Image (spheres, rainbow, N blue to C red):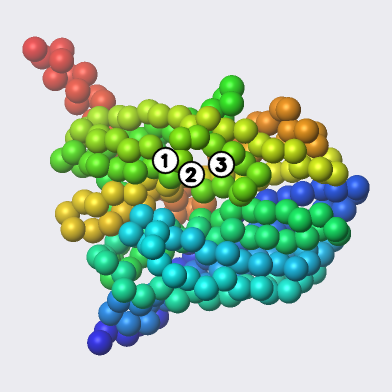
Amino acid sequence: MRIFAAIMLLSIIALAYTSFGATVSLTGLCTYSSVSSNTVNVSFSLQNSGDFPATGVSLIPKGLGPLASANISAYSIGSIYPNATRGATFNLSNLPMPGSYILEVIVSYFQGSSNFFAAFPCRFNYDSGNLTDYLAPISAGYSDGKLNIGLFNIGSKPINTTINIIAPPQVRYSPPNRTATIDPQSDYNTSFNVSVGKLSGLANASLGVSMVAGYVYDGKYYSTLENLYLSSSSSTTTSISSSLLIVGAFVAVFVILIGLIIFSVMRKRKRSRQGQ
């Protein structure tokens, strides 16, 4: 049995609700440690940087892709007061193959007497070393009631992928997912219809929404993750906007490198066409 502890910052997602001058602002942090040949512990914590407590906080985990059928226990962690941090550790066993996986954590909590929800993606690696995603996100955003995403296959073989949305219950979207086959050195663009339900009593809201493309490549499972904010300045959410959330310096550098790779591929294509 190979046992090691490899703890790594995976994702930081923040959300903020402002209600009657009081703000709950939660930031989620995921780390993981591999504890056996097929078991990973994923630790998830929430920090409240607002000025009002989040009470009755529950963490409800849900696996994506090969983890969809996993039975993972939920946790109640009580209250998170301003400048405090609380969390829990989820034990994931019998992982089917090496790779990168996504654990979705739905957070339910109360701000005063109102119940709110948030969704956080936790990405972790299992027995895979350093992975390079073969599907690179090249665009993501919200426009005219749609979440749009563009992916580019930088690999040398076709990729069959399923794209899922991670969102809190007040964000409604359709279809439930998208499936596609993306040819090598080709891009793929798709969209989801989305609407945000009424957030009663709120002056402002900022919700984290993620798009995950899962696929198998050379015997490993991959999860390409892209994060967005949906924000609203009215309780009826008749007008929402989005902004891209960069998850750490590593991802920023990775996106730049992918951009350079895609640019190089495009230049080679152009030269090849001119030479014909």
Residue 90 visible in image: yes
Q: Position of residue 168 (x, y in %)?
A: 61, 49
Crowding at dot 1, Cα within 10 Å, few <14 / some 14-19 / many 20+, comes out as some
Q: Nearer the viewer, residue 212 or 139?
A: 212
Give the residue at x 80% y 37%.
Answer: 235
* Left or right: 193, with 213 as reference point: right
Q: Mark 1 or 3 closer to N-term?
A: 1
**Where does label 1 land, which residue?**
177
* Left or right: 89, with 171 as reference point: left
Where disc 1 sits, the SS reads strand
Where disc 2 sits, the SS reads strand
In the figure, residue 203 lies in which quadrant?
top right
* Left or right: 146, with 233 as reference point: left
Which quarter of the rendering shows the N terminus?
bottom left
In the figure, residue 190 lies in which quadrant?
top left
On residue 228, the disc is 3
Say if mark 1 contacts mark 2, CB within 8 Å. yes
**Is residue 84 placed above or below 146 in the rendered structure?**
below
